[in-house]
Amino acid sequence: MTDAVRNLNNAALLNSAAYYASLDPPQGSGNGSPQAFADPVEAGKTLAADKCAGCHGDNGVSKTPGMPSLVGLDPQYLVTAMKAYANDQRKNELMKSMVGLVDESDFNKLALYYALQPAARAETPNPGDQAAGKSAAASCSGCHGESGVSTSAANPSLAGQDAQYLAAALAQYKDGSRQDETMKAMVGELAEPAMKNIAAYFAQQRPQAPNVRKPLSTDEWTRRCDRCHGLSGNSTDPATPALAGQRADYLAQALKDYRAGTRKSPQMAAMSDVLTDSDIDNLAAHYASQKARSVVFVPLK
């Protein structure tokens, strides 16, 4: 496009725009329609009730000593943990058998469901010296955050977690049955009482839900897009393009370019930043199938 318009003056640009604006608008291209929206949170809730609640508690808040709570964890971390149990990176026969009952494509739904639940401390006993644990846990904040609330998807939050589970995990890192070189080095000099104290400190801290949004349906997204691009993508603003009847492949690529930052627009970058590939495909299919309407713009002098 840069080469194509390089030698055009303003009058030629205006005439070109006027010519294309005078043509009948394209109609729905018919290349696909949005997939029906299946709420992943509701799917995760069903899976959690069926597969996880018996051990990890209703809504992921543990009531069983030794069983971890699943709330307050970043979905990416929780998915990684489930995969680790599935492929024996983490040794636990019960967990291996349980995750084997869940299709790997559903791990994200489970993790998203738990991430969106209210964060609460595990409802389990909390033995140990919390004051001594606070001092011993000072070196943990670099990875696991202040008071055990992690800001990294790679590192779990520890705040509010079941104390017995935390102490057992530390012991497993120390003896190598849970493999992580960084954690093995961190706990190498810890005696069992110190592990229990650290676990007691973190178990008492207030957990926080991770910063995760509930996915929007295609209908919810289009209502947002229509605010600028007009009802069903028929823009009435000369500065904002119409989307109705446009090619789905073009719309999808444009959204991906805005998301990646290769196409510049602060407004579109903010809108597209959280779109998944599925969101983009469904939005493109929706607007490609809409009826385009002619609009006449009258310049005011």
Image: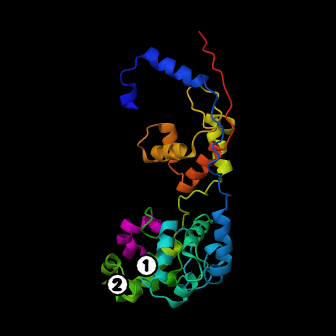
Residue 138 sits inside the magenta stretch:
yes
Residue at numbered disc 1: 198
Lower position in the chain sequence, tag 2 or tag 1 = 2
Q: Residues within 10 Å of mark 2 (few under 14, many from 20)?
A: some
Residue at numbered disc 2: 190
Residue 169 sits inside the magenta stretch:
no
Q: Is residue 61 above or below residue 115?
A: below
Q: Is residue 121 above or below residue 281?
A: below
The answer to whether 134 appears left or right of 226 in the picture is: left
- Location of the N terminus by quadrant is top left
Which amino acid type corresponds to the residue marked 1 in the rendered image? Answer: Ile
Secondary structure state at the residue bearing disc 1: helix
Q: Residues within 10 Å of mark 1 (few under 14, many from 20)?
A: many
The quarter of the displayed image where residue 52 is located: bottom right
Number of disc labels = 2
Q: Main secondary structure of the magenta part?
A: helix
For image coordinates 64% across by 65% down, the residue present is 41
Which amino acid type corresponds to the residue marked 2 in the rendered image? Answer: Leu
The boundaries of the magenta stretch are: 133-150
**In front: 26, or 161?**
26
* Coordinates of residue 296 in the picture (x, y in percent): 65, 21
- The residue most toward the top is 301
- Location of the C terminus by quadrant is top right
The answer to whether 225 appears left or right of 9 in the picture is: right
Secondary structure state at the residue bearing disc 2: loop
For image coordinates 55% across by 59% down, the residue present is 212
In contact (CB < 8 Å): disc 2 and disc 1 = yes
The answer to whether residue 175 of the structure is visible from this angle is yes
**In front: 100, or 11?**
11
The answer to whether 82 appears left or right of 189 in the picture is: right
For image coordinates 50% across by 83% down, the residue present is 165
User: Label 2, label 1: how many angstroms apart (C-alpha)?
Assistant: 10 Å
